[in-house]
Amino acid sequence: RPRALAATWSRARRRRQHARRGAGGGKRPSRGILLRFALPVLVALGMLGVGLYGPLGLAGGDDTHCAPPLELRVLTDPDLEDTFRTAADAYLTSEANTTEAGCRRTGITVYSAGSSDVVEALRRHTDAWKEPGADEVDPQRDIGPQPDVWIPASRAEVDRVLEQQDTDAVAELEPGERPLARSPVVLAVPSRLAPEPLNEVTGRPLTEMIEALTARAEDTGVRRPDPEFTDSGLLATVGLYGDTAAVARGETMVRQPGPPSPTAGDLLCALPDDDAVDDRTAALVPEFLLISGVDCEGTVRAPRTALYPADVPGMDPVFVRVRWDGGETDATARDAAVASFRDWLAGEGGEEVFARYGFRDPDSLEPIDEDVDLDVVSYAPSPLDASAGRDEMERALGAYQAYGGPGRVLFLLDSSGSMAGLWEGPSGGPGLLRQTLGGLGSDDEYGVWAVADTGDGPYETLLGFGRHWRRDAEEAVDERARVRDASADPHAALLAAFDEMEDRGDDGRPQMIVHITDGRHGSYLEGGRLREVLDRAGAGGVPVTVAVLGSGGCDEGRPDQRIAEVSGGRCLDAGDDVGAALHDEIARIGTGDD
């Protein structure tokens, strides 16, 4: 069964890829590629007229033999593969694809590959796709054969290729003018956590929806599929980062152990592995999967309700004809086969398949199937961004990829007189700081400020901001860190720290401010001063992790707890293993001790 084998091998490869991705201490995975080993088998079987297309035999029971059908190769987004496989299967036996003699005009192979890899190959490597060489770039090996048709999940992906395609490219794209169907990307919330009343299901930014969700249940998590692998993950990332490109804050909202699931379908199937996780985790997935279901129907999953963020673009798959230089031999027949399949998809045949899978009408945005469960999805959510822009998709992907690079951390070490009893030993202020340095590497940038009134300002620089070898950094802290007979002004120090990180630029690299303190701030973090710090922390996009050397410093409503929460960071006190927890937080930002 070639098709079953293809799916099995594909899933096995995805598991291996993501296992390798997760082997770097929690770092964001490198780019993955969906390699379908069975494609050559499928193509060969299709050319022989067997496998997906049935045997070449007597048509209609007479003595007429059917000629081998022309083979079309259809490349699509991984989240759409099941839909278009079903559509291709239906088309193969339709009247549109059957001759008067009962023979099939066309065979179709549907396959998928990581969305960012496909865009890059169509931009830069069409020559290697057509004629693979000895170099490492080989799209035929890593993606599949040259497609006749490409169906990305967003028209923006086509625009990204057309805007930056090499002038000597040997593939020409001809996109359709309208999408085949639409599907919003939704925040699928466990129904027990859905807002009441449901008039809150749409019209708000994604980050605001997530904040409201976590306010209802603190242990709630949010997950999203891999933005490099499938368009649904990248579309969700557009909303996570927002207009201000607050990358670190957005990534904090979808932080999870291990690498992200490759596809939205994989994500919805992975959550039930742990009932407790499934029951308190929202998923950013295309709406149609909540209607059609996913390939794990035997698993009991927590029921979910769809929320519709106002700033998350939706899926709008478009049919793209791909012409290759030198393909003139059968150009007329191939054009006719492509046009027939395209017209069928845009007509009643395709509409029936899209309705079955839970898609919306491309023009009205209403569900094609009027019998959908309105307890799960909204009939006509509004407002609803239906399409993504080329530039915002490009920016979001670039920021996501950069986020996995070297990090930036600014340490603020409370060095005021009240820290005298919390200074010595591995659990003292300098000792904790030294422990965290193992999560940073020579490519990361960091600095250390001693926060206490110096007479000239609210802090003294112990270690200048930049790249450091760990031994040099530890020696600098050991030699220069000391308790001052002076008070600390965390209000002024934190505002200066926000300025420092802002000056470093928002290039998508992970950033963090770490404040190690005893939590005795007095009037320095009260009233208008506290409000000013909270405003800057909320708007800056740089998470603040506060390590309070004492008990109760992270109680609800305390200044350090509020600063950490509004910035997207963490507050750690005596109720936590502060050293281990702080090291873990730094490890999320840094590249690791080398």
Image: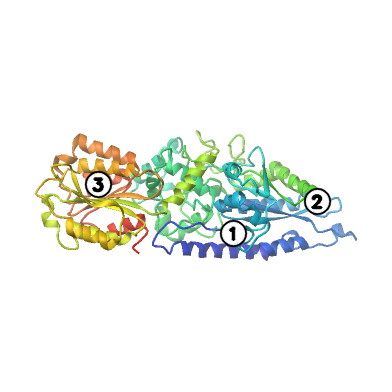
Residue 145, position in %: x, y?
67, 58
- Quickly name the residue at label 1: 137
In this rendering, the label closer to the viewer, 2 or 1:
1
The answer to which of marks 1 and 3 sits earlier in the sequence is: 1
Considering the numbered disc 2 on the image, is that residue within a helix, a strand or a loop?
loop
Could you tell me the amino acid type at mark 1?
Val
**Quadrant holding the C terminus:** bottom left
Query: Decide: marks 2, 3 in contact (CB < 8 A)?
Result: no
Circle 1 SS class: loop
Q: Quadrant of the N terminus?
A: bottom right
Instruction: Give the number of the mark in front: 1 or 3.
Output: 1
Q: What residue did someone put label 2 on?
A: 98
Where 366 falls versus 132 (above or below)?
A: above
Amino acid marked by disc 2: Thr
Residues under labels 2 and 3: Cα distance?
68 Å
Cα–Cα gap, marks 1 and 3 = 49 Å
Viewer-side residue, 457 vs 276: 457
Report if residue 577 is visible in the image: no
The amino acid at mark 3 is Gln
* Neighbour tally class for label 2: few under 14, some 14-19, many 20 plus, Cα within 10 Å: some
User: Residue shown at 74%/60% (left/top)?
Assistant: 46
Residue 455, position as x, y percentages in the image: 13, 42
